[in-house]
Amino acid sequence: MSAPVPRITLLAGGVGGAKLAEGLAAVCPPQRLSIIGNVADDQEFHGLWVSPDIDTLTYSLAGLIDRQQGWGLAGESHRLLEGLATLGCETWMSLGDRDLATHVLRTQLRRQGMRPSDIARHIATALGVEVELLLPTDDRLQTRIRTPEGWLAFQEYFVRERCRPDVLQVRLDGVETARPTPEALAAIADADLLLIAPSNPVVSIAPILAVPGIREAIEASPAPCLAVSPLIGGRTVKGPADRMLVAAGRECSNLGVADGYAPWLDGLMIDHADAADRDHLEARGLRVATTRTLMADAADKARLAGELLAFAETLHGEALACP
Amino acid sequence: MSAPVPRITLLAGGVGGAKLAEGLAAVCPPQRLSIIGNVADDQEFHGLWVSPDIDTLTYSLAGLIDRQQGWGLAGESHRLLEGLATLGCETWMSLGDRDLATHVLRTQLRRQGMRPSDIARHIATALGVEVELLLPTDDRLQTRIRTPEGWLAFQEYFVRERCRPDVLQVRLDGVETARPTPEALAAIADADLLLIAPSNPVVSIAPILAVPGIREAIEASPAPCLAVSPLIGGRTVKGPADRMLVAAGRECSNLGVADGYAPWLDGLMIDHADAADRDHLEARGLRVATTRTLMADAADKARLAGELLAFAETLHGEALACP
């Protein structure tokens, strides 16, 4: 008799999170996998509501992602954006024509009063995504970055300024009043295994955890919770997570990563390059697994997902691996 | 000494109106030409405000129009629309990617509270249009068509149903409360010559005239008023104007066309094919000129515009032709 298939809930940001999501989707039945994404880097462009991390998850799981850049749709054109430039608009946010269909529909449905969660599911389902893609909140949550030049919206910092300004402070607007979605709370409560993707701990995972009720639901869950570190050799593969850890007053290391998930994190999967962190992490009571965490292709993603499930088994004491 | 350049104000619908507008722009200095367009066939698609007749005028005057079909931009792609179809949206309204930039910007600026007139000017100016393109009203005006299957929005009748249903009644929602724009009133009051394009009299020109104050301004103007008939051989070149005249309880002939512009119309330019209408029209006190009214190319448009100005001179008793 084979072991029961565990219910897995993954907290994930954009590019790195989507890669692990793909890996898990490759090794787990879709009906046993829920993914809670990040909405705090959403921003309105040209009157259209853009949700970059959710779209990256959706497009990745639909197999439509531009594998070269890790975000956006493969084979995109940018005719509408060129048209907006001709009309005098600022067009530093790259928005492809097919991608814009997502934003146009999302904006229309939001104006019609549909819940953002239902919109995300509608879009994902239309694109053939089978795993459950959830929002942590249907309320407006906005990461703001303080730089020497002042406060910036996340996409202004990330895309327009290409992460060049020093990060002095990170703020999360709307967090006091944000309510968790019942679907996200249920996915956490029902999970046999909670996972945190190798996403930016400060601007991708922290905004999910900051929604009142989400962290509490994780703490209340008896399921083991494992994270994959986004650091390789003490630095991020891509993006500003390393500098943001420092700006958030944390150590730019796997200890700094783990700090954000303490005290409810059970284990951390780190890269071989950071094997020296093991003792420090274990001294804090964390279980540690080392592997090659870089996910360059589909085989890497599935391998890492499989190793993560095997790591979970060692904590849980029983079979957690998907058939 | 050359004659003073007259100020010309043209009332125009979509495709046919845009052709005469181009002809006039070719023979007149742009600063002496104002065009009042039709907004009653505007409609929201996918949450975006589309203004087909105004866009046809804008794109034509900018030299960007698809000459083959008479509307839309040349060299268009339809990737966003294909994306919306994938997402389960109805996509019977053809909206190109570059064209959608116009609708996205218009919608954004409308939501920001900018006057539709200012938006139309902003877009036209950005695309290099030099003549003054005006809206008859900034208020919402909507042509509705009653068919055997019920009431339809104009674009539903015109595009989705391809003008196939019988037209039982035409209604203009919002007309009681619509206010004319000061720019349109000024363009009529200041004109030395008022022109009506060979557009659909019922759904393109009538909605302009129906805005309270517009018809009164034309009646109050001492300038001669000339129209070009949209009929050739008693039928329309394109579109359902002939059937709509009948639905509006008017004769499907140049007399039916003139009826909509009585009693302030001074002259009507008709096609050679309808020369037999001359006596009936003159019996009603109208001056009549016959010519080839079909505008197949740029030379046709400029020729017709020139002939129209020459026709105006014969009424006005002094030179009206542009230098």
Image (spheres, coloured by chain):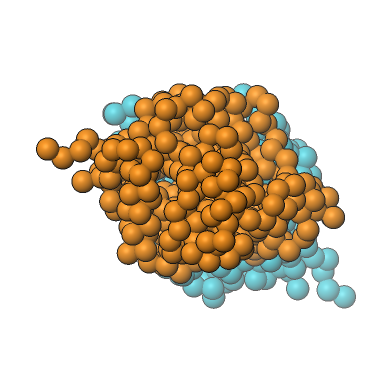
Chain colours: A cyan, B orange
Q: Quadrant of residue B111?
A: top right
Q: Residue at x 32, y 38 (%)?
A: B317
Total of numbered circles in the picture?
0
Q: Residue at x 16, y 40 (%)?
A: B2
- Is residue B191 shown to the viewer in this render? yes
Q: Position of residue A296 (x, y in %)?
A: 45, 70
Instruction: Please say if A283 is above or below A69.
Output: above
Instruction: Please say if A70 is above or below B323.
Output: below
Which residue lies most toward the left here? B1
Q: Position of residue B141 (x, y in %)?
A: 63, 35
In front: A78, or B241?
A: B241
- Is residue B60 shown to the viewer in this render? no
In front: B318, or B162?
A: B318
In front: A267, or B303?
A: B303
Instruction: Please say if B170 is above or below A320.
Output: above
Which residue lies most toward the right here? A1
The quarter in which the N terminus of chain A is drawn is bottom right
Q: Residue at x 51, y 28 (%)?
A: B219
Q: Position of residue A62 (x, y in %)?
A: 62, 66
Q: Quadrant of residue B89?
A: bottom right
